Image (tube, rainbow, N blue to C red):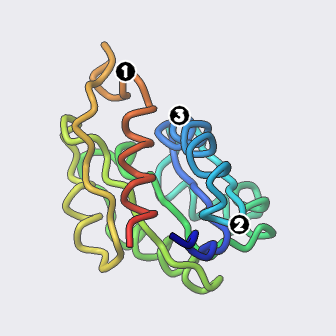
Amino acid sequence: TRKPEPRGRLALIGDSYAVGLGPELEKLLVPTGFYEGFEYEGHVGASTQQWLSRIASGQWGTKIATFKPKTVLVSLGVNDGATPNPDFYRALVMVFQAGGARVIWIQPPAAVNTPAHAIIASLGVQTIPATNTPLSADKLHPASYAPWAHEIAGEITRG
């Protein structure tokens, strides 16, 4: 069988989930050559509003912007509180789409109760389903990011 053509560059942005997923996805995806490159940037406690304002001010995402990914994975939402603003989610999607990237939003873990799940599902972009990976004692972060990264890699390399 022929190896599929690389799908351009892939980036991951987000919160503490991106901090944990980045190295695991890098281990899984870079050796396969399925993507022409992979970059990630995560900030613990980051919200969608913080990402928007810090992209606008040039504080976050500059490495991603110069990398010019064809696909951007977004892992945000849990830090947006009990009443997240859907406009911030849509604005982030538009920022990356304006740069020519396809956006794929990663749902937070299923066991994490957040209204972000519904907003993410309403964005009209591909989503990675919420993982059922067991959580650590903090009931927020996975005990291990490796199983979640395997799920994500499977979703984005399918087809």
Please tell me how crowded label 3 is: few (under 14), some (14-19), or many (20+) other residues with Cα within 10 Å: some
Residue that appears at 58% across and 79% down: 101
Q: Nearer the viewer, residue 11 or 27?
A: 27
Say which amino acid is labelled 3. Answer: Gly
Precedes in sequence: disc 1 or disc 2 = 2
Q: Which residue is mark 3?
A: 20
- Left/right placement of residue 4 relative to residue 47 reads right
Q: Whole-Å distance between the Cαs marked 1 and 2?
A: 30 Å
Say which amino acid is labelled 2. Answer: Glu
Say which amino acid is labelled 1. Answer: Ala
Label at residue 83: none
Location of the C terminus by quadrant is bottom left
Displayed quadrant of residue 13: bottom right
Image location of residue 110, percent across then percent down: 20, 42
Q: Residue furthest front?
A: 1
Count the labels in the image: 3
Q: Secondary structure at mark 1?
A: loop
Q: Which residue is mark 2?
A: 36
Q: Which residue is mark 1?
A: 143
Displayed quadrant of residue 158: bottom left
Q: In front: mark 3 or mark 2?
A: 2
